[in-house]
Structure formats: structure tokens, C-alpha cells
Amino acid sequence: DAGVIQSPRHEVTEMGQEVTLRCKPISGHNSLFWYRQTMMRGLELLIYFNNNVPIDDSGMPEDRFSAKMPNASFSTLKIQPSEPRDSAVYFCASSLVSSSLQQYFGPGTRLLVL
Amino acid sequence: RKEVEQDPGPFNVPEGATVAFNCTYSNSASQSFFWYRQDCRKEPKLLMSVYSSGNEDGRFTAQLNRASQYISLLIRDSKLSDSATYLCVVSAGGGADGLTFGKGTHLIIQP
């Protein structure tokens, strides 16, 4: 069975560039979550969607970050302009229903901003 | 005070030994508790839920102490493959949106 798919797996960019991370949730899951993981702060929830609708984006660091979910099978997280402090591993996760407490994580995107 | 606190370790344990680590949480209204496992450079995966009565899954035992606001994970007869980071996860509500992750405890099983 296909799990959560993320692309790219690795991204190296220069400060000021736009970065777009992509996620395909598990088919049938209707909740999608974007997380960021760093050594200093651990795993932080950035935003989550229920049925393609953004529910809580209070974890989004600032206006440079934006996320969309145009349909049930695709979501993007965009950083514009990127900064070195954005370097982290970004995970996408999905769950079957919004009340499900078991989230399935994708392999993550390792982002390095120089 | 951090919402979910864990000893980062590393815990260096010989193969076959028993190891236990705890996690404390600050929100007394927390309702659901989990342990996730994360291998090096991999994504977190659910290891087990933690029930009020405690639960066991093979060599793994999880327990909850609501009075003291901590959960524990016990691993018996540890294997080399148990080497990983173990994340404590707490939910204040019934929805998946309320998950708060600890930073994890790094466990190294030595041959």
C-alpha cells in the first residue's frame, strides 16, 4: 500500500529563493498535517487541513509560509522567501478521519537553506 | 514549562537488558497518550497507545500515571533493532489536531 508521499526528499536552496514542498496523503484520509522538525524545537505542527480546508495555521511561523490543499490528494507548503533558519525536516502526515489520533507520516523533506 | 518533556538521552543499554524511560506532560486535561518511534533519518511511526490501565505489546509495556502526569515505556529483552528515538505524544482533545510531541529519547542498544 502506498503511504504518504512527499517530494522532493531533499532540497538545497539559497536564502531568498522560493521553496515548494509537496505531499500526497494516503488515499481516503481526510486530514492532512504539515510538521517541521529541528533538533532545537523537536516536531512542531505547522498547519492542518480537514477535507481540504485549513483548520488551524497557528503554528505557521510567519507570512513567509503558506500551505494549500487544492484537492484531497495533494497539498503544498511554500516558503517565500526562504531563510537559513527554515532549514529543517518537513513532514507531512495524514489520518483517516479528523478524530483519528493515529497519524501516518511521510518520509519527510530535508530542507537546507544556505 | 514545556508541554511534553523527555530525557533526550542517549540511553546506552546492552542487548538483552530492560530499559525504561518516562515522559511528563503539563496539561492535566490531556486525554490521549502515545509512544511513537523514529529511526534515524526516518519518519515517526506509532509504536503504541497508552491506556489508563496500562498496556503491553510483546516486549513493550506502556503505563500512564495521571496523578503525577507522566507516562512510561518499558522495553524488555532489548534488541539491537530497538535502537531509535522514542517520542512521547500527548493529546488534549479527541481530535488529531491536538497532538503534542516531545523531543524524544534516544536509545542505543549495544551488542
Image (cartoon, rainbow, N blue to C red):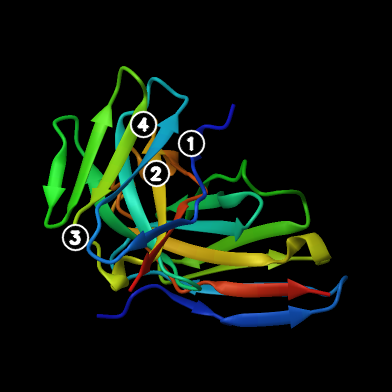
Q: Secondary structure at mark 4?
A: loop
- The amino acid type found where label 1 is placed reads Val
Q: CA distance from mark 2 to mark 1?
A: 8 Å
Query: In the rendered structure, which disc, 2 or 3, sits on the residue that comes first in sequence?
Result: 3
Does label 1 lie on the same chain as label 4? yes
Mark 2 and 1 residues: CB-CB less than 8 Å, in contact? yes
Tag nearer the camera, 4 or 1: 1
Q: Which residue is mark 4?
A: B93
Q: Which residue is mark 2?
A: B89
* Position of residue B66 in the picture relative to residue A52 (left or right): left
Does label 2 lie on the same chain as label 4? yes
Q: Is residue B98 above or below residue B28?
A: below
Q: Of B82 and B29, which appears nearest the observer?
A: B82
Q: CA distance from mark 2 to mark 3?
A: 24 Å
- The amino acid type found where label 2 is placed reads Val
Q: Of B78 and A83, which appears nearest the observer?
A: B78
Q: Farthest residue to the top: give it.
A: B67
- The amino acid type found where label 3 is placed reads Asp
Give the quarter of the image for residue A59.
top right
Query: In the rendered structure, which disc, 1 or 3, sits on the residue that comes first in sequence?
Result: 1
* Residue A25: % across, % down: 40, 69
